[in-house]
Image (tube, rainbow, N blue to C red):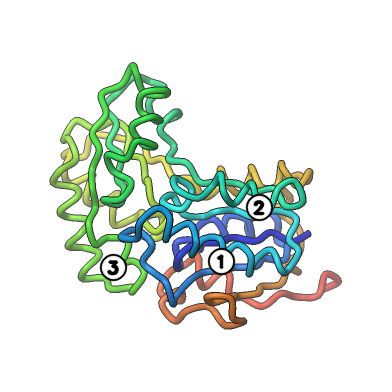
Amino acid sequence: MKIALMDSGIGLLAAAAATRRLRPDADLVLSCDPDGMPWGPRTPADLTERARAVARAAAAHRPDALIVACNTASVHSLDTLRGELEPAIPVIGTVPAIKPAAAAGGRVAIWATPATTGSPYQRGLIRDFAAGAAVTEVPCPGLADAVEAADEAAVVRAVTAAAALTPPDVTDVVLGCTHYELVEELIRAAVDARTGGTPFAFHGSAEAVALQALRRVGVEPRPGLPRTGGLTVMLSGRPGDLPRAAYGYAEGRLLAEPARNASV
């Protein structure tokens, strides 16, 4: 079994690590775009062309499914990618977990890139799934770039600024960018300081999209299997290695661990 994931950069690490934990035997293909990132400032048409190229590089490895591990690409390019690759390769998009976050009717904060915040796509999700909740959209300029560079000082500055825009009585925080899940603990700490220690729920997407990919492939999670799956990395269509910044995160270090023989 082979699962491919795509993103502009290392935001795909969270979903890739979740897939690795759920199916240690799965071969993973990570396809990102260091030549074209960041995607957020690009026009939707330009972004879609970059996403198509990255998806094609992944599809050349004949995966059983492709995860679009990028909220911005899912907003602007998912229909195009599905039109090109399905039904041969199921394509799984990444959607902010607004529906489960709003289910209890509390106060929801959605942390997202400026490109996603206020977009018709996100506003549509809020309209369709969060009618009974109070929703605050929190733009996080610079946070994804800081995570991509593994620049902890810049991450802290961006997280602190976003936390200041988060309501102090927030009950649920939705991470609307896959990069943000790599610094979840820093975000938790900043929001906790904002709320004065009042409990709140956190909603990412990594495990949900990994599980959906396995469902589309028709296999069950088997986290106890031996770690036999391989790793292939594509950088703007070229074979490569995990970016150095990936090793700054637990998810990247997990993925870098070598496969071992199933009989060991």
Q: Is residue 248 left or right of residue 160?
A: right
| Dot 1 crowding, Cα within 10 Å, few <14, some 14–19, many 20+ | many
- Kindly report which numbered mark, 2 or 1, lies closer to the viewer in this rendering: 2
Q: Residue at x 64, y 47 (%)?
A: 83
View extreme (front): residue: 45
Q: Would you say the residues marked 2 and 1 are in contact, meaning their CB atoms lie under 8 Å apart?
A: no
Give the image location of residue 51, x and y in percent: 51, 61
Q: Is residue 243 above or below residue 177?
A: below
Q: Amino acid at mark 1?
A: Val
Nearest to N terminus: mark 2 or mark 1: 1
Residue at numbered disc 1: 54
Q: Amino acid at mark 3?
A: Ala
**Residue identified by numbered label 2:** 84
Residue bearing mark 3:
146
- Residue 14 percent coordinates (x, y): 50, 58
Q: What is the quadrant of residue 255 in the picture? A: bottom right
Label 2 neighbourhood size at 10 Å, few (<14), some (14-19), many (20+)?
some
- Could you say where residue 149 lies in the image, as x and y percent from the top left? 33, 74
Q: CA distance from mark 2 to mark 1?
A: 13 Å
Element on which disc 2 rests? helix
**Residue type beneath disc 2:** Glu
Per the rendering, the mark at residue 154 is none
Distance from Cα at disc 3 to Cα at disc 1: 22 Å
Q: Is residue 154 above or below residue 119?
A: below
Pinpoint residue 196: horizontal percent, then vertical percent: 16, 39
For mark 3, give the secondary structure: helix
Q: Is residue 133 left or right of residue 141?
A: right
